Structures are given as structure tokens and as C-alpha cells.
Amino acid sequence: MARGTRVVKWRRGRRDGQRSYMVGAFSLLTTCALAEALLIRLGQTYGSTAEERERRLPGDDIVTSPQVVTNHAITIDAPADSVWPWLAQIGWHRAGWYTARWVDKLLFPLNWPSASRIIPELQHIDVGDFIPDGAPETKCGLVVEQLEPGSAMALHSTSHLPFSWRDRASLDWSWAFVLIPVEDGQRTRFLFRSRWVTSPWWFTLGGWLLIVPADFLMSRDMLRGVKQRAETLARSPSYGAGM
């Protein structure tokens, strides 16, 4: 009789343990799914308003039927002419992308530190110029497709893929950098939009699960990096003297 009781208790305890494990696993999966959904949402919208997300921007006609659209924005306490020089010089082994140095070291160890000064020789850009986003042998970069000096620049890439993937995957990607003066030009709204389409399905799925959440971190860093540099420039004595 005692032995039978022990068996029943053991079985009951085993069932309770399995149930607890399943509840715990379900809770963990739910938490991870909610966190991923939040990161995807932030990766699509961080800093932007609903009106800005609906607004037509330069470069929207480059990728006409995107699978993914991201919109990010920040208000900069400086006029647009103290923001634009930082955008004109972006690029790999140019002025960088103004992301945090630890991010570059972790993800892009070959990147130089982002510039903290205006580089005069990098200020002239034209439609058709190639802006590198990797070492020359990668042939990775973006082409200037549309340009409104001082206010907007639209870039286009089909090269942001490892060489080993280029015969079995594709990416068509546009970036738009737009400056909108606010408060009589004393401040600037900086909008950054990306639009892209990918194939095949596994690359598209990876884009949603990995690239879009990463875009929240990288774009937020870039926006803040430009904001800090532009506001510092606007406060400097040389700014009022025409830099």
C-alpha cells in the first residue's frame, strides 16, 4: 500500500514538473516573441510620427514596391546648414556613419572611427557618385540617385550582399536623408527612410527578424550621432563666421 502511494506521488510530481516546464517554456517563447515584435516595430518607426511615415520623400520612386519600409526621425537644435555637411561626407573610410564606436568595433571592426569634424574635401557630392559601405574588394556601397544640396539625398544599393550570396539572393535598397527646417529654421527635423525588397523567402524572413530590429539600434545611433555633431557645430564660434 505504501509503495503504491509512493508511485502515485512520483507520477503526480512528474506530471507537475512537466506542466511547470511547459508553462515556463511557453512564457519564455511568448516573452521572446513580444520582444521581437517590439524591436521590429521600433525598427520600422523609431522617432518618427504617423504624418512623417505617410509623407512622400525624395527617393520613394527608387524602390517602388517595397516589402519593408523603415522611418526614423529626430529633432536637431540647429539649422539645416549645420546638419547637411555631416550627411555629405558619410561613407566607409570617409566620415563613417556616426554610430557608437563600440558598435563599429563589434559589428564592423574594419571601420574607422566616425569623424567629429567637417572634412572639406568630402563636401562635394553629385548624382551618380558611389558612396562606399565596405572595403573596395566587396564592391559594397550606395549610388547617389537624387540630390537636393542642403536638404535631401537619396541613395540606392543592390550590393549589400556577401559575394557568396549574390548568385542566389537579391536586395534592392534605398536610403533617404531629408532635412526639414522647423521653428523658422532654427531647428531641423532629420528624417531617415529606407525602402527595400529582397528575395528569396529565407532572405526576406531574415530581413524582418534580424535586419529590421538591428535598424532600430543602428539608425538611432546614427540620428543621435548627427544630432550631437550638428548641435556642437552650431554652437561653435566658427559656425557664425561661415565655418
Image: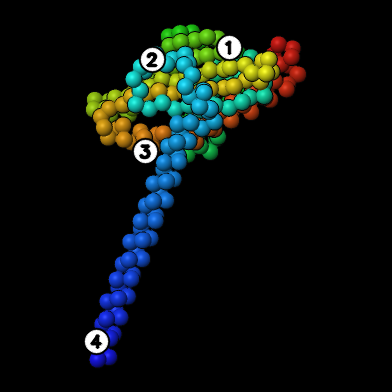
Q: Secondary structure at mark 1?
A: loop
| Of the image marks 2 and 1, the number of the one nearer the N terminus | 2
Mark 2 touching mark 4, by CB under 8 A?
no
Q: Secondary structure at mark 2?
A: loop
Residue in the foreground of this view, choosing between 119 and 152: 152
Instruction: Give percent across and percent down for residue 179.
Output: 57, 17
Between residues 211 and 15, which one lies in front from this camera angle? 15
Q: Earlier in the sequence, mark 1 or mark 4?
A: 4
How far apart are labels 4 and 3 at the CA level? 51 Å
Disc number for residue 4: 4
Between marks 2 and 1 in the image, the one whose residue lies nearer the viewer = 2
SS class of the residue under badge 4?
A: helix
The amino acid type, in three-letter code, at marker 3 is: Leu
Crowd around label 1: few <14 · some 14–19 · many ≥20 (10 Å)? some
Name the residue carrying label 3.
209
Task: Report which residue position mark 1 lands on.
Answer: 150
